[in-house]
Amino acid sequence: MISNLVNHCSSAKRRMSPVMIGLATAIGVVALALFSSAGAGTQSPQTAVGQSPADGNAQSAPMSTLPTTASFEVASIKPNHSGDRRFFVSWQPGRFNATGMTLKFLITMAYDVKDFQVSGGPGWVNSERYDIDAKEPDSIAQELEKLPDEQREPLADSMLQSLLADRFQLKLTRGTKDLPAYALVVAKSGLKLQAAKPVDTQPDAPSGPGGHPHGPMMRMGRGELTGQGVALSFLASMLSQQLGRTVLDQTGLTGNYDFTLKWTPEQGGGMMMAGPGPGGGPPHDGAPPPDASGPSILTALQEQLGLKLEPTKAPAEVLTIDHVERPSEN
């Protein structure tokens, strides 16, 4: 779910704290900063639970005695009528907070899917916004902190799914379909990406607890995407949201990169680049419109980054909203 703008963000929501996503408007600037829950942030990102940073020798992951499903101990859900299109998500030890979130976005977080994989439901699902403050049971919160990511993920998902079912009376049908997709590959002209610079040399790098720099960071605007220290799998997820299709990272590249991508977006583009949704009002970010004579996103990828999107098909989970109600009173 922190990605959940996207899958990468969705996974990061539980292993990195807090996750902040600021959306000036639906077509304004989006800044994604992932702050490590390690506190000072001196721990290497490759250091896993049960692994000593000093010797790098992996040890056995701790055995989990947690249940396979769980619910929040208490949760407050309030409508957000501020008119502010920015939103915030934070999953810190023991507590989940969200500000200005639509139910549809919460569904994508809870089920680790993207916007285009969710259909059905009344219009307010994607327009009305909510503030959520939910507390995990102390016993579960303490145990979760001891576990590696792959063991935290299912239980954290289950708590958010339970919240949506209980307070929104959400009922879904889950299925799988072969859908049109893209494969992200290196173009024949060759890769034009720059290897990521150390985060502390970048003036715009996000700061974590104690003022220590952290990455990766992604800024998004109308027809522009800037990444610092970003893996191509994350770029693929961002492109997926924009294009409304699954984008598979088939570059074979495992490094992190710095880049800026500029293109002319199509009218009614993807979730992160389109204009405000129903009830959202006119855009008010003041950003100049993209150059109408600029390249399409497919052309820009090839010319500016040396990457290409090839049409393909891929199985994808699809969720259909069968029933939903506005949340019950706190």
Image (tube, rainbow, N blue to C red):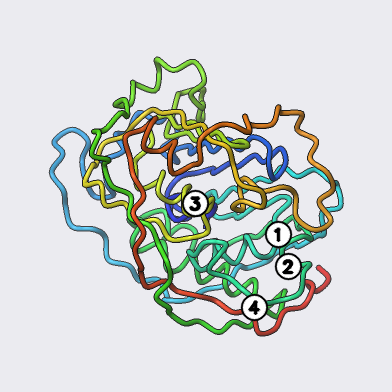
Cα distance between the residues tagged 3 and 4? 20 Å
Given residues 239 and 302, the one toward you in this image is 302
Residue identified by numbered label 1:
102
Which label belongs to residue 125?
2
The numbered mark, 2 or 1, whose residue comes first in the sequence reads 1
Label 1: few (<14), some (14–19) or many (≥20) C-alpha neighbours in 10 Å: many
Residue 74 as seen in the image, left or right of residue 258: right
Q: Which residue is drawn at 64% across and 39% down?
A: 22
Which label belongs to residue 165?
4
Residue 177 appears in which quarter of the rendering?
A: bottom left
Tell me whether the residue at label 3 lies in contact with that at label 4, contact meaning CB atoms closer than 8 angstroms: no
Amino acid type, label 2? Val
Tell me whether the residue at label 2 lies in contact with that at label 1, contact meaning CB atoms closer than 8 angstroms: yes
Residue identified by numbered label 3:
13
Residue 212 as seen in the image, left or right of residue 121: left
Label 3: few (<14), some (14–19) or many (≥20) C-alpha neighbours in 10 Å: many
Residue 134 as seen in the image, left or right of residue 40: right
Query: Does 111 sit above or below residue 299?
Result: below
The numbered mark, 1 or 3, whose residue comes first in the sequence reads 3
Measuring from the top left, give residue 230's x and y in whole percent.
Answer: 38, 36
Residue 147 appears in which quarter of the rendering?
A: bottom left
Viewer-nearest of labels 1 and 3? Answer: 1
Tell me whether the residue at label 3 lies in contact with that at label 2, contact meaning CB atoms closer than 8 angstroms: no
Q: Is mark 4 on a helix, strand or loop?
A: helix
